[in-house]
Amino acid sequence: MNVPFVNLNLQYQSIKQEIDEAVSKVFETGTFVNGRFVSDFEELFAKAYGVKHCISVANGTDAIYICLKMLGIGYGHEVITTACSWISTSEAISQTGATPVFVDIEEDYCHINPQVIASKITNKTKAILPVHLLGQAADMNTIMRIARMHELPVLEDSAQAHFAKLENRNVGLFGLAGTFSFYPSKNLGASGDAGAIITNCEDYANRLRLFARHGANNKHDHIIEGINSRMDEIHAAVLLAKLPHITRWNRLRQQHASYYNFLLLGVAQVSTPKVRSRAEHVFHIYQIRCEQRDALEHFLNSRGIETGRHYPVPLPFLKPYDYQMHRPYDFPIASKYQKEILSLPMFPEIEKNQIEYVVNSIREFYTR
Ligand SMILES: *Cc1c(COP(=O)(O)O)cnc(C)c1O
């Protein structure tokens, strides 16, 4: 049996007609940027989030960069973020000229440890950037409390956590703004690169939009120098077609996660993912922690099962951050996770017998 890590074709097949119609409508209108699909998507995404403003952008990395820039963040400033994320998070900080200041993760979740944040705050700190990694909320209540105490804005990298909740509130709505990626394999994915920012602050929303559209209020009225960061009509049309399905897709992911958890009960060498109290995890990634990770990974791959690591190397230990001269003991939890984490196949259309095959293979590995 082959079990892919994700299968975007199955998703397409399940809503083929809706996608095909959406895409051909874009070609028929002949408008490929700045059109109706983008504005409709912004409106419906904002409505689904219960937020006042949604600004569509070209990708999730831009979304973070634009948010930081419009806070006036640049050279000589510091932004506090997590040691465990995709590089977009820290790249966007460096792109402004500021320095990413990494914080170790929590013992039970791979999210920024709020207890460490305060010790990293200096007079150069301009923002806190937590990431809702893997599809689950970071500890936003504690983070917001610390941020308020130090009067720092919070931006939430929600690229992996569309409609994930904490205490019944969608992530992305706790801080000043939430940023999203619609990279094809995300829980809500476009047919290429796309992203968005949500915020309830009107003044900030206006500045974000201005910067993402060449600093112009309308075509030739340039107020500042901005960048070109637009969502294409074709991606907006695809996202509009997919938006009505996201709740069901997230629910399926949750059901698959429960089935994995159930089948993995009693496999002493494996810890299944912990869900934060009063949080709703949307399982962008189903990540276990396990013994003999490298050997298990190799065994599963040899059995036709694709796996992943999210992420193989914590951000502070990636080459671009050599200049910060970090050592493993600076990030003890992230360093420990690095050796134990393994992501198993997870997508809404995965079959029960595929999950069974994955878990049987894991059991087989440990009883050889
Ligand atoms: C996917 C992702 C992003 C943004 O990715 P883009 O490819 O630029 O859309 C940012 N942060 C995290 C944690 C991500 O997983």
Image: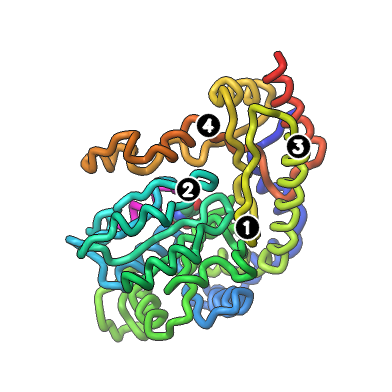
In space, the residues marked 1 and 3 are separated at their CA atoms by 26 Å
Q: Main secondary structure of the magenta part?
A: helix
Task: Please give the range of residues in magenta.
Answer: 85-93
As helix, strand or loop, the secondary structure at mark 1 comes to: loop
Residue at the spot 63% in from the left edge and 51% down from the top edge: 275
Q: Which residue is mark 3?
A: 355
Residue 169 spot, x, y in % from top left? 60, 71
Callout 1 environment at 10 Å: few (<14), some (14 to 19), or many (20+)? Answer: few
Relative side of 179 to 171, left or right? left
* Dot in front, 1 or 3: 1
In space, the residues marked 3 and 2 are separated at their CA atoms by 28 Å
Of the residues under marks 4 and 1, which one precedes in the sequence? Answer: 1
Can residue 56 be seen here?
no
Of the residues under marks 4 and 2, which one precedes in the sequence? Answer: 2
Callout 3 environment at 10 Å: few (<14), some (14 to 19), or many (20+)? Answer: many
Q: Which residue is mark 4?
A: 340
The image quadrant of residue 317 is top left
* Dot in front, 4 or 2: 2
